[in-house]
Image: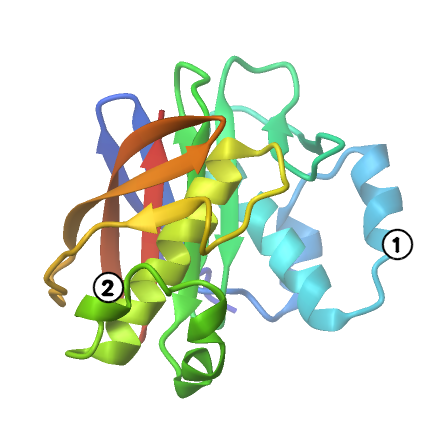
Amino acid sequence: MLAPEVCIEKQNELLLAWCKPIADEYFLLEHVRLSEIEKTKLQGMTAQRRRTEWLTTRWLLQNVLSKDIEISYQATGKPELKNADLSISISHCQEIVAVLIHTKGKSVGLDCETIAPRILKIKHKFAKRESSYIQQNELENLTVIWCAKEAMFKLYSKGAIDFNEHLKVNDFDFSTEGGTFTGTILKETVTNYILQYKHIQNSLLVWVSE
């Protein structure tokens, strides 16, 4: 098979990269260099989609960085890069596998989601604060808000976050060209962040950094 195109954007100390998921596990096993620990972890995975997403993430990372760096995970589930002064956030959905790297090691958060009507069924669980401005382009707005709160949750990385109570996304005008907006983590202290989003095919990608 032909390898998918790797898209890379560099913004000061941030590196954002994404590609299409690779479903061919034979291709991935041939082209991804795994440590013994990673090989053992892969053997424990039974779901095929989980295996190929996990492998695609490592294939993408090895195509972005000039050297092999192993992904490990903290007790909270937050990914980190072993033996590197870099920080990372990872996300994948039906159309995208993506990584966000901060070259100075500051905390980052990244999330992608496919735009789909199922999000309407759970909007009460995460978008009560934002209900006043989501009527127009509702599916797109809700997906941006969900991704933004997931990204801030990943950046915070301490768990125990209520998406309605502790996370806020301020009003924004959705554009298929992407853009920026602001959000707030209301936990322990009030901290404001600038978030960015990108519309890729039928999915949305949102990211944030310290």
Q: Amino acid at mark 2?
A: His
Report the Cα–Cα distance between label 1 and label 2.
34 Å
Q: Is residue 155 above or below residue 52?
A: above
* Displayed quadrant of residue 52: bottom right
Residue 201 in the image: x percent, y percent?
28, 73
Residue 44 in the image: x percent, y percent?
89, 55
**Residue name at image x 45 percent, y 56 percent:** 164
Category of crowding for the residue at label 2, using alpha-carbon neighbours closer than 10 angstroms: few (below 14), some (14–19), many (at least 20): many
Tally of numbered tags: 2
Q: Is residue 82 above or below residue 198?
A: above
Q: Disc 1 on helix, strand or loop?
A: helix
Residue 195 in the image: x percent, y percent?
26, 42
> Which quarter shows the C terminus?
top left
Which numbered circle lies on residue 43? 1
Quick one: label 1 or label 2, which is nearer the N terminus?
1
**Residue name at image x 42 percent, y 41 percent:** 152
Q: Amino acid at mark 1?
A: Gln
The foreground one among 210 and 199 is: 210
Q: Is residue 84 above or below residue 27?
A: above
> Marks 1 and 2: CB-CB under 8 Å?
no
**Residue name at image x 48 percent, y 54 percent:** 163
- Mark closer to the observer (1, 2): 2
Left or right of residue 184: residue 43 = right
Left or right of residue 15: residue 162 = right
Q: What residue is shown with label 2?
A: 199
